[in-house]
Amino acid sequence: MVNVRQSDIAKELNISRVTVSKALRDHPDISQAMKKKISETARKMGYIPNLIARQLNSRRTFTIGIVVPDLENSFFSYVVDTMIDYATEHNYYVILTVSREKQNIEKQNIENLIGMRVDGLLVCLSQETTDNKVFKMVEKMKIPLVFFDRAFENMRFSRVIFDDKSGAVNSMNRIIQEGYTKIANFAGYSTTNIGKKRTEGFYEAIKKNKIPLRKEWILESGFELKDGYESFKKLNSSGNLPEIIFTVNDRVALGAYKAAKEAGLMIPKDIGIFGYGFNEITDFFDPQLTVINQDPRKLGLEAIKLLISEIDKKTKIRQSIISIDEEFLWRKSVKRKLK
Amino acid sequence: MVNVRQSDIAKELNISRVTVSKALRDHPDISQAMKKKISETARKMGYIPNLIARQLNSRRTFTIGIVVPDLENSFFSYVVDTMIDYATEHNYYVILTVSREKQNIEKQNIENLIGMRVDGLLVCLSQETTDNKVFKMVEKMKIPLVFFDRAFENMRFSRVIFDDKSGAVNSMNRIIQEGYTKIANFAGYSTTNIGKKRTEGFYEAIKKNKIPLRKEWILESGFELKDGYESFKKLNSSGNLPEIIFTVNDRVALGAYKAAKEAGLMIPKDIGIFGYGFNEITDFFDPQLTVINQDPRKLGLEAIKLLISEIDKKTKIRQSIISIDEEFLWRKSVKRKLK
DNA sequence: ATGAAAGCGCTAACAC
DNA sequence: GTGTTAGCGCTTTCAT
């Protein structure tokens, strides 16, 4: 028989549907013997509970809605992977949506997820998003929501984010403690948050360590391979190379690699390079890039943990801010001077 | 007001709930004036339809369940990304589950998704899976299912897969037409399907092109970096190098790169390397690897298209087999001899 | 220990 | 055009 319902089981056994419902949920009302009989016939008949019906009257769906800007970015794949793992372990489903970095798609996704009556939302804002109207609605409906990586700051929601500035400061400190003082910065645009925060960290470390600031070593341009490539050429043609370059991301670093190699310079012998980057990719660089690593698994795990605890009301406070540490990983693109 | 229902709107306007329901779905029964009035109050009151309730009595959820072995593998991220895109465009939700390559998790996932009454399933089997029992149940329940990448072959389900053998043959032909005859094969294990099919293609191309087979150039080992590394060392120490090496995947290729560089050999000048690999990763190789590319986007797109057409009953035939072409991409790790 | 009645929010079938 | 009735499959009172 196909598509078996509780009432079918009840009819089969000549009992009431309610008894079946209770037995299947191991309700104390029902005797062990009855429970056994019912669960056996259920199995035999191929019964699979209709969760939709259960959700309707329990007003709980055990479903979490995720909105990510993108999935081809492997960073978010790791985040989502981790979230799904934890959610599954805790008996939640995950409905995954992608905003493609578009504000209107994001809004649509969230409205749909509310319509699906998800128990909670995990959102990484799109780059475009400036309007918080739909989130105001989520607030009003008291649906638990946790932002990750990119968040609205002035709302009654928790958020889990990286501390870019302190990550940059700490990493710079490590490099400086190693004995480096001639450090350039391929900075990306200071108009975007990422570029700004990372460069702030750079400046702060330079200042705190009393290293003279050399303006000609701060090259502000874009976030792409060509930007790193051109910055390096510019730097090299000045005839005044630093010992080491701090890059705003892995694509810029790779551009610098390329230009350095073309100029006949060896990494790390003639010039060192380190900076922000995605672990799994920079592993393939030759030599492997020394990186400041933002671990997507940590981010994802903290976000889903927080959300589920808010759903379960274990947390009353709805506005935690969790900062994920950025780790500095020594690899091959920077020469160790100490030890 | 929070959590507005159709009946709330009805009460507000002193009309019946059914009128509201019909108006909101643009049913021809209702007058334009009424529709306008209703949809305006709905908006004003912040009404969001309860899809769970709608799903319950329409027995349609507009939800598709996906089961992938893994998401940290960026191949599957691309697949899923593409599927979600297409699904969203066609007004379907996606519930994403991960089997972690475990048969029992996969089974649990599928049972849960059936419980959620998904309209269809997209499944890539785990490596462990040998038991098709749960799929027999899906068959019996007449739930549309499409396998992608890894499939059961003897079931009444469609599948979308790569044709590994012909991909290998075609790529080998390209290399041979370019004038290469001294070709080695770093083959992986012939006990797994991937290793077997790709190597079959290698043999077939060698044979068809009447190139003498040199057993000492067939190195069967594993699928990891170290395997490529050691195979290359072995090959090189024999003092009898081929012109070019065909590798079973990108990690093996990278191992070969490493060993070649250590031996002071230049790629592609002294030795060429090509083989199976993931585009986005082998882009970062130095030099970029000439690859046989399996496009995850093509795979994902064909699978979801097929599934949705089966759900919509546009397709009566439930056992299509779609073969995705593998493309050969000339890049830097093989010297062009012609043109 | 078991069951009858009512309802979750919505929609299809049928009246008026 | 609008409203009434009934039911999707399940669970939660409240009786027995």
Image: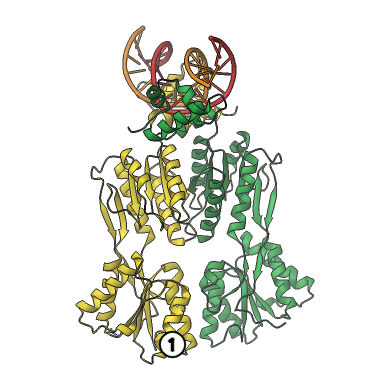
Chain colours: A yellow, B green, C red, D orange
Residue B45 vs residue A167, the one in the foreground: B45
Chain identifier of the residue bearing label 1 in the image: A
- The answer to whether any part of residue B47 appears in the image is yes
Q: Quadrant of the C terminus of chain A?
A: bottom left
Residue A293 vs residue B219, the one in the foreground: A293
Residue A112 vs residue A58, the one in the foreground: A112
The picture places residue A162, in percent across and down from the top left corner, at 31, 61
Quarter of the image holding residue B265? Answer: bottom right
The local crowd at label 1, few if under 14, some if 14 to 19, many if 20 or more residues have their Cα within 10 Å, is some
Residue type at tag 1: Met
The picture places residue B41, in percent across and down from the top left corner, at 40, 31
The picture places residue A210, in percent across and down from the top left corner, at 20, 82
Q: Quadrant of the N terminus of chain A?
A: top right
Q: Is residue B133 above or below residue B74?
A: above
The picture places residue A176, in percent across and down from the top left corner, at 26, 80
Q: Secondary structure at mark 1?
A: loop
Q: Is residue B78 above or below residue B29?
A: below
Position of B202 with respect to A7 (left or right) is right
Position of B326 with respect to A235 (left or right) is right
Q: Residue at x 47, y 49 (%)?
A: A105
User: On the image, numbered disc 1 is attached to which residue?
Assistant: A266
Q: Residue at x 43, y 47 (%)?
A: A107
Quarter of the image holding residue B316? Answer: top right
Quarter of the image holding residue B187? Answer: bottom right
Residue A38 vs residue A189, the one in the foreground: A189
Position of A196 with respect to A47 (left or right) is left
